[in-house]
Image: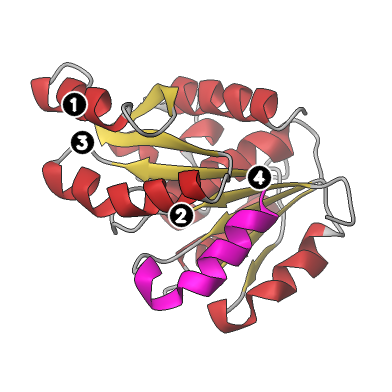
């Protein structure tokens, strides 16, 4: 990589695993830490970039809100991400599901990234869908970590899923819980991290601390 920027790729085969939620929250944590942040949104639904536009409007009303650009892109032009990386300290990349339809692009982005986060729920469908992707990342020697999201830590199914996936993939020691606070403020371009005492905010902040350690920030 030509610059000293740190790139965080968030990718999962399964939909509904909080990719966009984590992209938003991690970006906010980085921006609140005073870093020059940008997001890249490869999802055709543009969830991340639409949220960013709403955040820009909220900042006009609440100037203390930290703002940063999120650039929509298409996977067919994924190499354009390198230009964004060259201009910022932290770049967070959100992706769509259905990796099998864009395998070359996903592998290229993964190789470009400093760290790949693979969010997953704890159901059998979540684990079985993500297993081939995690194994391919491991085979390619790409630094990747599983982040359990939208989970109830007290359930047997979560504990079993964590034990199962830890046999072949590295799992970060923090989970993002099922919590309304994680998404209820999204229409205003905010996250749980922006809201004092929001449920899940401390978990996200811990996740950010772990990411900083892994990418040597």
Q: Secondary structure at mark 3?
A: loop
Is residue 179 in sight in this rendering? Answer: no
What is the chief secondary structure element of the magenta stretch?
helix
Residue at the left extreme of this rendering:
156
In this view, which residue lies farthest toward the front?
139
Q: Residue furthest bottom?
A: 76
- In this view of the protein, which residue sits in the foreground, 32 or 150? 150
Q: Position of residue 97 (x, y in %)?
A: 36, 65
Residue identifier under label 2 = 11
Which of the two labelled residues, at mark 3 and mark 4, occupies the earlier sequence position?
Answer: 4
Residue 66 appears in the figure:
yes
Tell me, yes or no, whether the two marked residues, 3 and 1, touch with CB atoms within 8 Å: yes
Name the residue tied to disc 1: 158
Q: Which mark is residue 62?
A: 4
Mark 3 vs mark 1, CA separation in Å:
5 Å
Residue underneath mark 3: 122
Establish if 179 lies above or below 107. Answer: above
Label 3 vs label 2: CA separation? Answer: 16 Å
For the residue labelled by badge 4, is the local secondary structure a helix, a strand or a loop? loop
Give the Cα separation between the discs numbered 3 and 4: 37 Å
Q: Which residues are magenta?
A: 99-113
């Amino acid at each position: 990589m030509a610059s000293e920027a740190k790139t965080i790729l968030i990718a999962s085969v399964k939909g509904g695993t909080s990719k966009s939620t984590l992209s938003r929250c991690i970006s906010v944590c980085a921006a609140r830490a005073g870093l020059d942040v940008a997001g890249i949104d490869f999802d055709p639904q543009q969830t991340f970039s639409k949220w960013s536009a709403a955040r820009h409007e909220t900042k006009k009303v609440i100037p203390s809100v930290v703002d940063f650009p999120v650039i929509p892109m298409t996977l067919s032009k994924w190499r354009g991400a390198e230009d964004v990386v060259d201009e910022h300290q932290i770049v967070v990349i959100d992706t769509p599901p259905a990796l099998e339809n864009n395998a070359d692009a996903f592998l290229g982005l993964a190789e470009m990234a400093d760290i790949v986060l693979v969010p997953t729920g704890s159901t059998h469908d979540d684990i079985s869908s993500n297993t081939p992707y995690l194994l391919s990342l491991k085979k390619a020697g790409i630094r990747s970590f599983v982040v359990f999201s939208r989970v109830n830590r007290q359930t047997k199914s979560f504990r079993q899923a964590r034990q199962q996936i830890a046999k072949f993939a590295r799992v970060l020691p923090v989970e993002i819980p099922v919590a309304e606070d994680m998404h209820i403020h999204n229409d205003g371009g905010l996250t749980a991290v922006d809201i004092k005492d929001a449920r899940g905010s401390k978990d996200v902040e811990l996740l950010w601390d772990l990411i900083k350690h892994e990418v040597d920030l």
